[in-house]
Amino acid sequence: MLTETVALPGHLSTETVFDAHPQNVRVPVLIIANQEDACPVASPRMASQVAQAMTHAPEVRLISVSGGPRHAAKPCSSRSAHGYEGMETSVSRMILSWLQAHGA
């Protein structure tokens, strides 16, 4: 399961999800992307590319959500759209439902 996925290099680290060899993943994957996420290393526009990179996963589900503070002082903090601020319950329910459907 991926949330707040670092898909673009940043100033503190140049490592991204693509450096973790997503093509080697062989289990079902859930990706949640918040369209309001303004964190420069976790752009929601990259979510479909992350999903497409999971070429050996038997299932990749991408859920797009929208919400949270739009103009947070720290856009990569948990108290922003990046951290699903104000959406915790609904996003947690989506995750739980997906986990239950996959026997977790």
Image (cartoon, helix red, strand yellow):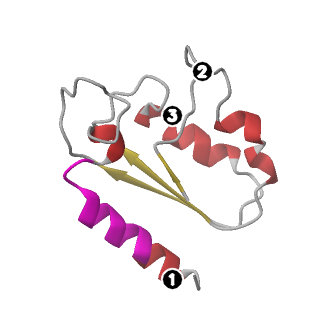
Label of residue 101 in the image: 1
Q: In the image, what residue occupies the spot 57% across and 82% down? A: 104
Q: Amino acid at mark 1?
A: Ala
Q: In the image, what residue occupies the spot 60% across and 21% down? A: 9
Q: Amino acid at mark 3?
A: Met
Q: Tell me which numbered mark, 3 or 2, is placed earlier along the sequence.
A: 2
Residue, disc 3: 46
Q: CA distance from mark 2 to mark 1?
A: 33 Å
Q: CA distance from mark 3 to mark 1?
A: 26 Å
Q: Point out residue 69 in the picture as x, y percentages from the top left corner.
A: 18, 37
Q: Is residue 81 above or below residue 26?
A: above
Q: Quadrant of the N terminus?
A: bottom right
Q: CA distance from mark 3 to mark 2?
A: 12 Å
Residue 21 figure quarter = top right
Which residue is the extreme one toward the top? 11
Q: Point out residue 15 in the picture as x, y percentages from the top left corner.
A: 68, 27
Secondary element at image label 3? helix
Residue, disc 2: 9
Q: Is residue 101 left or right of residue 92?
A: right
Q: In the image, what residue occupies the spot 81% across and 52% down? A: 24
Q: Is residue 28 above or below residue 50?
A: below
Report the magenta residues as a range: 85-96
